[in-house]
Image (spheres, helix red, strand yellow):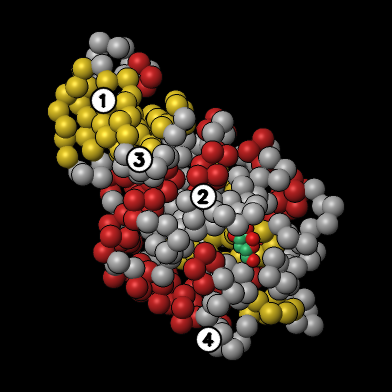
Amino acid sequence: MGWNSWNKFGCNVSEDLIKGAADAIVSSGMKDAGYEYVVIDDCWQVSRDAGGNIVADARRFPSGIKALADYVHSKGLKFGIYSDAGVKTCAGRPGSSGHEYQDALQYAAWGVDYLKYDWCHTGTASAEWAYSTMRDALKASGRPIVFSMCEWGTAKPWLWAKDVGNLWRTAGDISDCWDCKKKDALSFVKIADMQDGLETYAGPGHWNDPDMLEVGNGGMTTTEYRSHFSLWCLLAAPLMAGNDLKSMSAEIKEILTNREVIAVNQDALGMQGRRVRKDGDTEVWAKQLSDGSRAVILFNRGIDETQVSVSWEELGYPAHLSAGVRDLWMKKDLGRLAGMYRVKVPSHGVVMVKVTP
Ligand code: GLA
């Protein structure tokens, strides 16, 4: 869990922005809710010096990266950075190709705790080889650094990256829209669909990453953002907030810090939830939790409010069972129900419950 600069700020990064985000994670209550990693995405770097060392943008980061990492650490948070396996990053800054060990040592000396490693300008390189090289370089640096693989699912990393990265992107870049008009853009629902079937590959220490959150960035309604956040929690996805934490509304903060929903995401069993039923525009998604209960999302993708139901059998329980049902957004116990639960779900919305036998 953490925050990353890209979705909202793109290349417009600076030490003031990152310090401000660290301050806001603490003051907003996000840190208390579990958000920990503050990650600068692309565009912090400008060149390499005569010795091949990566050079940060001195105008935007006048105190240097080490001082910034120290600041983030002083807030009780962890610090992350971005590079690329190719010769250039996606925004055209110097990549790490041919400098993997040198860069890893530099990151460790700065106090970096997390590396997001992108896949632009990699030519014909093998992803497995390139990511394993940086994995080895990070290991050799002697500092524990979370390794976030960003190759967009191109080479199906879920099949081979369990011992390479801690998380891997399963799709291209998310767009801040329910179902975008823009050609080729990956909306929230398109990305959600792409996660169906990947659940068996995720587990503690090696997670599918459907991309960072767009919650609070303005392109979707509050109801849609609640659906986006609920799905990502059920998918055991990394929760990297991507909004402006300094100016978020009370509603957005309430979504990002709902502890009962976050507890589903962080559950110790580490199972990724899956879609158990799709009936046109209505869907049921479920995730097994360590106490034997299930987190369930009743999802309505249609344009009208509609009833959605889930039976205990669909969740793997005996049909006759009576089970406790708790609504995780209303934070309310609905009592013990026999066999099933049925509820009206708003258009583009979810009802998210925990079912406990
Ligand atoms: C790629 C990644 C994004 C972001 C940008 C930065 O598109 O997938 O998440 O890091 O590069 O340029």
Task: Indicate the quadrant containing the C terminus: top left, top right, bottom left or bottom right.
Answer: top left
CA separation in Å, label 4 and label 3: 53 Å
Q: Are marks 1 and 4 in contact (CB under 8 Å)?
A: no
Quarter of the image for residue 49 reads bottom right
Q: Which residue is mark 1?
A: 341
Amino acid type indicated by mark 1: Tyr
Report the amino acid beneath label 3: Asp
The residue at which mark 3 appears reads as: 304
The residue carrying pointer 1 sits among few (fewer than 14), some (14 to 19) or many (20 or more) residues within 10 Å by Cα, namely some
Q: Nearer the viewer, residue 279 or 33?
A: 279
Which of labels 3 and 2 is toward the front? 3
Please report whichever mark, 3 or 1, sits nearer to the chain's N-terminal start.
3
Residue depicted at 34% across the width and 47% down the height: 262
Quadrant for the N terminus in the image = bottom left
Q: CA distance from mark 2 to mark 1?
A: 28 Å
Closer mark to the observer between disc 3 and disc 1: 3
| Residue 71 seen from this side | no
Can you tell which of label 2 and label 1 is closer to the viewer? Answer: 2
Q: Position of residue 180 (x, y in %)?
A: 54, 53
Q: Where on the image, by quarter, is ligand 1?
A: bottom right
Q: Nearer the viewer, residue 3 or 98?
A: 3
Residue ID for mark 4: 63
Q: Nearer the viewer, residue 64 or 307?
A: 307
Rounded to the nearest angstrom, the CA distance separating label 3 from label 2 is 16 Å
When the figure is inspected, residue 232 is found, relative to residue 24, above or below; the finding is: above
Task: Where is residue 65? Give x, y as percent.
Answer: 55, 77
Mark 4: amino acid: Ser
**Circle 2 residue:** 179
* Number of residues whose C-alpha sits closer than 10 Å to that of mark 3, classed few (under 14), some (14–19) or many (20 or more): few
